[in-house]
Image (spheres, rainbow, N blue to C red):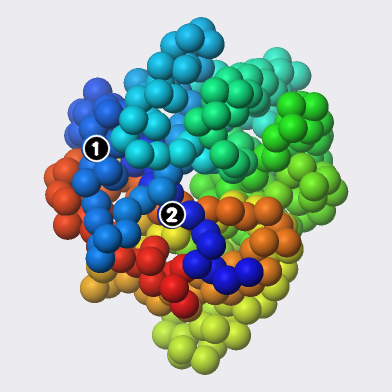
Amino acid sequence: MSLSSLKLHNAMWPGLVGKGDDEGQEPPISLEKMLDFSAAAEVNGRKFDGIDYFLFLPHTNPEASDDELKGIADLIVSKGFDIGSLVAPVWPGTVGDSAMGTDEQQEKFLDAVKMACRIAKVFNEHEARKGGVIRIDSAEFGVEQWKANPGKGTARIVDTFTKAAKIAADHGERLAAEGEICWAGMHSWKDMLDLLEGVGMPETLGFQADLAHTYLYLMGYNASEHALLQEGYTEDEFYAAYEKMTDKLRPWTIDFHVAQNDGEVHGAGDHDKTGKHCPADDSNGKLDITRCSQYWLKDFQDRGIKHICWDGCMFPNSTLENPATWNAILKAMIGVVGA
């Protein structure tokens, strides 16, 4: 099966992540506006096929009634989109709490997964959602507490993720854990692999690879002992390291985010010190998006991947409101599936 069979999705959460009411923050962008931005994008007659979706306020109340959820689904479909992967509200301040924490915190994390599975069921039965996964991470921000006792920290996250995976399996869903340097126990390619293997449920719990975040895996931010590249690397050194990383994580990869990164660590609000997403055509971008995507998408059909999604967290609102942004993103994604 060629890459051309993959559907192209746009993420809704860039309208929320890093936004807020605190000093220096920009206000969130509504779901309907994000849908309209996506629907307006077009490159040589090709448009986005669907959206991936964060299950929290102000876009969605995770405790919304079935009828309210069906109304949201109808809104999304009315813009010409299927619903794909969903992001469970696992973080402190949403529904969940740290997967590395106390029994009470773990129960909150599992409650968030249950909520996401319930919403997925409503969307599925309403025939608005045609596939995709439910995304999670450890919800333990920063690595300092984990580093105090790495074995204990990873074991606790493994326990939480195993329980979450069993919940997902009971609902006919799959969980994808997003590797990102800010989440403890998931902050390097090696620690991420240890976590996935510790759970050992590849049919239910896999990896969600993001081009921007996994670039920083190569550089060893927050885990210098696992760095595969050093500053000043050559192109040959880059692709040798990239192949090593993707060979380890690709067998677990069940969800994929197209993105760009300029090598900086960036953040906004309570989502700080993570990989900086850049516009697809950013002149400072470190990645050949098309070529790097092929490493992750080899044999994609064997892992049940049916769509790819753009992720541009923490773009300024002025960037998100610019139609040229979305056409550049769509063009990059068309390049991936046309490779």
Question: In the figure, 239 relative to 321: above or below?
Answer: below
The amino acid on which the numbered mark 2 sits, given as a three-letter code, is Leu
Left of 75 or right of it: where is 233? Answer: right
Viewport quadrant of the N terminus = bottom right
Front residue of this view, candidates 75 and 159: 75
Rate crowding at label 2 as few (under 14), some (14 to 19) or many (20 or more) other CA atoms within 10 Å: many
Q: Look at 17% across and 43% down and name the residue there.
A: 321
Q: Can you see residue 307? A: yes
Q: Which residue is mark 1?
A: 36
In x, y percent, where is residue 323? 16, 51
Question: In the figure, 121 relative to 330: above or below?
Answer: above
Q: Could you tell me which secondary element the residue under label 1 belongs to?
A: helix
In x, y percent, where is residue 128? 50, 31
Q: Which residue is mark 2?
A: 8
In x, y percent, where is residue 316? 21, 45
Q: Can you see residue 150? A: no
Question: In the figure, 194 relative to 16: above or below?
Answer: below
Rate crowding at label 1 as few (under 14), some (14 to 19) or many (20 or more) other CA atoms within 10 Å: few
